[in-house]
Image (cartoon, helix red, strand yellow):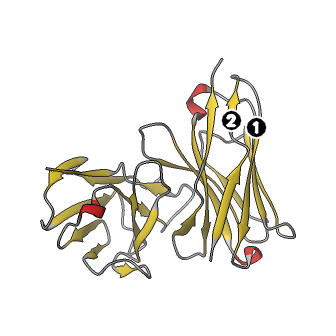
Amino acid sequence: EVQLVESGGGLVQPGGSLRLSCAASGFTFSSYEMNWVRQAPGKGLEWVSYISSSGSTIYYADSVKGRFTISRDNAKNSLYLQMNSLRAEDTAVYYCARQARPGPTSDWGQGTLVTVSS
Amino acid sequence: AIRMTQSPSSFSASTGDRVTITCRASQGISSYLAWYQQKPGKAPKLLIYAASTLQSGVPSRFSGSGSGTDFTLTISCLQSEDFATYYCQQYYSYPPLTFGGGTKVEIK
């Protein structure tokens, strides 16, 4: 069974940093591309970042470019999102989601809540 | 960026109804269109990909159609467990991966 479990969310002050993790199991992690997608309270889904299976190709949404860094450790079956210079508008539930291009994001974790507030 | 526009944004329906949600892309995306269902406090669940292919385990009352810029999600006979918010997603061209704004299906 595919499992994606996010962790690392919490309350952080504006300008602060946070590192999210996504632990994967039940599939060959190194064969799949991964994404982070977020959802602000009461709002829709917003794609944040993508990383290829090897980690060689990375994309970011304009709203987080220069502040967030996606990475992965295939030996540890883990995906990460380093978030710096956090803003109130980054407050959201962050989901990790696996993808096998040319397909869509097929499986999602349960999400971790990030709250940016003073 | 490809913009995805869903309509309506919300509506009320009764169990047993046939319901249709539409999604329009700002440019052609072939059939690279997925539909997700999301219930409160839960992660989105993939229902349909490639515009019309049912994900394994998804009931056959769900169906999708369309290609190019115009797509529809149809629920043939609405069940109580289908009251949720539905999102379309294009994966034809990114970055960015883009989603529609969502359609909330509520109980009448």
Let me know if marks 2 and 1 both belong to one chain. yes
Q: Quadrant of residue B86?
A: bottom left
What label sits on residue B50 in the rendered view? none
Mark closer to the observer (2, 1): 2
Residue at far top of view? A118
Q: Residue at x 52, y 58 (%)?
A: B97
Residue A76 image point, x, y percent: 85, 66
In the image, residue B27 sits, relative to residue A28, either above or below, namely: above
In the image, residue B60 sits, relative to residue A3, either above or below, namely: below
Lateral position of residue B56 relative to residue A77, left or right: left
What chain letter is assigned to the residue under label 2? A
C-beta proximity under 8 Å, tags 2 and 1: yes
What chain letter is assigned to the residue under label 1? A
Q: Residue at x 58, y 75 (%)?
A: A101
Q: Amino acid at mark 2?
A: Gly
**Label 2: element kind:** strand
Identify which residue, B89 or B31, lies in the foreground: B89
Q: Residue at x 30, y 63 (%)?
A: B81
Q: Quadrant of residue A64?
A: top right
Disc nearer the start of the sequence (2/1): 2
What label sits on residue A18 in the rendered view? 1
Mark-to-mark CA distance, 2 and 1: 8 Å
